[in-house]
Amino acid sequence: MATFLVAHGAWSAGWAWKKMRPLMAARQHQLFAPTCTGLGERAHLAHRDLNLESHIADVFATKKDVDAQHKAGHDGV
């Protein structure tokens, strides 16, 4: 079993990886897909000072909680 931490693209959210979750689970892998602050279900947390550094901090905060052997992301296009 492997653990994956994936990051969504711009203007997206953790739900962007929803089709991957059952595929990974079928192979006994764990998939963590956090949503960045101010986007998706966390849109209510948006404020004018949010930037790329904020989103990087969101991903690293999850990384601290998860021992992920593999990391992936996409650009949202």
Image (cartoon, rainbow, N blue to C red):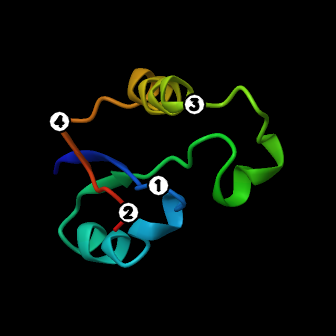
- Which comes sooner in the sequence, label 1 or label 4? 1
**How many residues crowd around disc 1 within 10 Å: few (fewer than 14), some, or many (20 or more)?**
few
Q: What numbered label is drawn on residue 2?
A: none
* Cα distance between the residues tagged 4 and 3: 27 Å
Q: Secondary structure at mark 1?
A: loop
Q: What numbered label is drawn on residue 69?
A: 4
In the rendered view, does 68 fall on the left or right side of 52? left
Return the residue at label 3.
Answer: 51
Q: For residue 13, what is the image quadrant?
A: bottom right
Return the residue at label 1.
Answer: 10
Quadrant position of the C terminus in the picture: bottom left
Return the residue at label 2.
Answer: 76
- Which comes sooner in the sequence, label 1 or label 3? 1
Q: Residue 31, how many percent across, how many down? A: 34, 55
Type of amino acid at the residue the image marks with label 4: Gln
In the rendered structure, are the residues bearing label 2 and label 4 in contact, judged by CB atoms less than 8 Å apart?
no
Q: For residue 75, what is the image quadrant?
A: bottom left
Type of amino acid at the residue the image marks with label 3: Asn
- Which comes sooner in the sequence, label 1 or label 2? 1
